[in-house]
Amino acid sequence: MTEINQTDEWMALEQHWAEVEPLQMRDLFQQGPERAEQMSIRQCGIMLDYSKNRITTRSMNLLLALAQAVDVDGWRRRMFSGERLNITENRAVLHVALRNRSNHPVWFDGEDVMPGINAVLQKMEVFSEAVRSGEWKGYTGKPISNVVNIGIGGSNLGPLMVCEALKSYQKPGLNMHFVSNVDGSHIIDTLAGLDPETTLFIIASKTFTTQETLTNAHTARQWLLDELHDEQAVAHHFVAVSTNAEKVSEFGIDTANMFEFWDWVGGRYSLWSAVGLPIAIAVGMQSYYELLQGAHDMDEHFLHADLSENMPVIMALLGIWYVDFAKAHTHAILPYDQYLRYLPDYLQQADMESNGKRVTRFGRPVDYPTGPVIWGSAGTDGQHAYYQLIHQGTQLIPCDFIVPVNSQNETGDHHEKLFANCLAQSEALMRGKTRTEVREDMQQAGLEPEQIVDLLPHRIFPGNRPSNTLLLDKITPSRLGSLIALYEHKIFVQGIIWRVNSFDQWGVELGKQLAGVILPELMDELQVSPHDSSTRGLITYFHRHRKR
Ligand code: F6P
């Protein structure tokens, strides 16, 4: 098979970038007053304006030809029909079934997975309602007022991000906490001030073998037993979410208190499974169903819409355009909503663990860039920190601005100010400020001619810096579901074009293995295994300075 960067479609895009590179977006806007209308799309309550990108109509056509050449259409159907797309682990990629609110059968290995999914949803509903209503009691008969989710990666970021995003939907008096880091400070800080009698722990781990999660879970268990002095208390205060019943049972959690999911749910796609239990407890099952519905609506759009009118496909192609043709190395996610502050972290895992790959599905090294570095934070804080580099640095950083039209906390004119800042940033990035404009400004401000000459180069903004703007009427459970699914499918399409397996993560294994070798050496000075002189020296330093 011809490598993707040797295809006619790819080479046409390379040539086309050379034509587009000198174009200024501000000129394109002037030449085509209907540009914004033509380059925006509305779907599932999300408005994507992608007109502030360094593209022409021809660019989009050439990008779409690339999508057709790799058969995005066929691949999307293969994912939804339960094919084992994760070839290195021989697994299907069926997180879309978890939010299949149409409830049509989804077949995998000759079995409809929907009854199993519905049974777990039902169990989540009963349990979350019992906790919320106070019917579920702790060991001493008190209702639960604090829920601590212990998990890491996909078993943390999804529920953490969604619970925060839907903060105003949370039940007052029921406080959600998330512990992920194996640094003892995380669990110690979280447990400080909590009462074991009214605390529920959810131990979330797909494999139930993750070192960080199990270490934190054991510490939490000990903390509970130190206060309640009875093993029987564990059943009232610990539940597990996992695919591994054996390990859950080994840990000492009754499998009756286990919420199941399946190996065809990738960790980074697991918030739609029982890993979403903290969400259900925090915002109620009705809102959780709405979240699933929003994602399902986006799934339907992605599966059925023509590629040229397909929101995830358009976002994926724009990303490819910058990474592979404009040679951008990073992509910023900039939500202008305080409650979306964990979205960049969430998308970091979703994108970088999926497409941070260096060989194709066929095992051949790629010689074109794949997944970019994903980063960002909630606006407006970043404006006073790193936006300087986005505006005037030497790197091209495509940005996604995400902003709701209505706030979850309306107060005075805060929201107008937030919104104005968001729009101002994308406009400034696109337009920049020319030499003439900067000079005029300084003349009007009464600066001396010599000062103007000195300051001029510093105050010019080159502009022409690309961004997407995503508007939502409000961050509701359903809109949020659609937004997350939008990014998931964007990442999927990019993986298809790059011809990588977006569903494994072998790259995290080596570090885990080596940590397993180093740990005994830190526990016991006499244990020594071969290392490079740097690692050896660092271990020696640890022993010398460690106060036990
Ligand atoms: O090490 C990476 C990873 O496997 C992620 O893919 C996953 O989300 C995370 O660890 C946690 O894994 P688990 O849910 O099995 O504890």
Image (cartoon, helix red, strand yellow):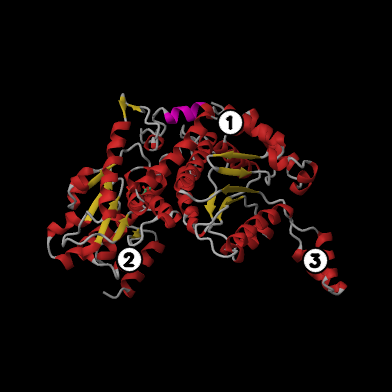
Between the C-alphas of marks 3 and 1, the distance is: 45 Å
Residue 75 drawn in magenta? yes
Mark 3 C-beta closer than 8 Å to ligand 1: no
Residue found 71% across the figure and 35% down from its top: 57
Q: Earlier in the sequence, mark 2 or mark 3?
A: 2
Q: Secondary structure at mark 2?
A: helix
User: What amino acid type should be assigned to the residue bearing mark 2?
Assistant: Thr
Between the C-alphas of marks 2 and 3, the distance is: 51 Å
Q: Which of these two is toward me, 452 or 272?
A: 272
Q: In x, y percent, where is residue 394?
A: 67, 57
Q: Is residue 199 above or below residue 303?
A: below
Which residue position is annotated with label 2? 190
Q: Quadrant of the C terminus?
A: bottom left
Q: Which of these two is toward me, 45 or 38?
A: 45
Q: What is the span of residues highlighted in magenta in the rendered image?
A: 74-80
Which residue position is annotated with label 3? 456
Q: Earlier in the sequence, mark 2 or mark 1?
A: 2
Q: Is there CB contact under 8 Å for labels 2 and 1?
A: no
Q: In x, y percent, where is residue 374?
A: 53, 51
Which residue position is annotated with label 1? 307
